[in-house]
Amino acid sequence: MKLFPNGDRIFEVISRYDDRLTLEEREGYEPGDTLALIVPFLILHNISEADITRLAAKAALTGGADQLIAWLEHGGWKVFCITTTYQQYATHITQKLGIYAHNVASTPFPLNKLKQTLAKEDTALLQAVEEEILSRHPLVDDERIKQSLDDFFREKLPTTELGVAIKEVKPVGGRRKVAALNRFAETHTQPLSNWVVVGDSITDARMLQAVEAAGGLAIAFNANEYALPYATMSLASTSIADLTEVLQSWQKGQRKGVEKIVKQKEKSGGKEDRGYFHWLSGRKDIDDVINIHQRIRRLVREEAGKLG
């Protein structure tokens, strides 16, 4: 969205709207559907699939990600990526990490094809709604944001060819992440109790919850308040490779082994920006955990860390 003027401000407002729809559990809406909501604006400003691929090529990996995944592959683990990200972006990043394409679930996004559905009369509508969105920034009135964007996304946009076309964009978030996980689980005949999942935001909450409920290991990594309550344990760190010892414990002693080592690490505490572990399963008060994750999340994810 930052590829065009004020795109970042427009995205912040739409992301806030997305959070509202998710929290009120609007029927048929999934967390992460932001990626469908921003499509009209990408089309208006002539963003292409090639632009998305170029951004992926420039993207930095989370610290320790290549190291951890190489260690997992060498140790005989099967590594998957279930991401809300557009397919063009996900393909590039997962190739960089050595994750097999058939082990990746992401959001199919035929942007170049969708651009052909933009009619001249739709351009004026989109420009008007952009001005309306920018008038809602900074984010001070959630109810007004919801009213104006409901009017656009539920009333006006569906009457256009573009609106009909973008209904086909189904971001992989919420229940769709759980469905993707279940497909992988069935393909490899492994119950969810044998899976370790790592997530960080509202799009991952249901997936974390499903694995935790099944007795698997659900890890919240540099997570926000929407993901942390559903995890078995958490890690706040600038390096995801800090999970290595925990995953070794999972191989040897499943949940009991992990609980023991995480509680030990929690006692000794993290150091600077690394190694803040917490055992969350059954824990009621997680305010202190949220605060630590918030700090490290912003360090690692920069501007994206401020979003819900």
Image (tube, grey):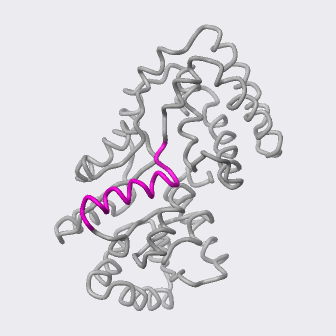
Residue 187 picture location, percent across and down: 26, 58
Measured as percent of width and height from the top left, residue 203 is found at: 53, 55
Residue 186 falls within the magenta-colored stretch: yes
Relative to residue 95, is residue 9 drawn left or right? right
Q: Residue at x 17, y 69 (%)?
A: 76
- What span is in magenta? 171-189
Q: Quadrant of residue 58?
A: top left
As drawn, 52 above or below 122 = below
Residue 245 position, x and y percent, is 32, 80
Please state if 161 lies on the left or on the right of 145 as rendered.
left
Quadrant assignment for the C terminus: bottom right
Residue at x-position 50% and y-position 54%: 175
- Outermost residue, top side: 120
Q: Quadrant of the N terminus?
A: top right
Q: Residue 168: say if magenta.
A: no
Residue 49 vs residue 278: left or right? Answer: left
Chief secondary structure of the magenta span?
Answer: helix
Where does residue 47 sit, x and y in percent of width and height?
Answer: 48, 24
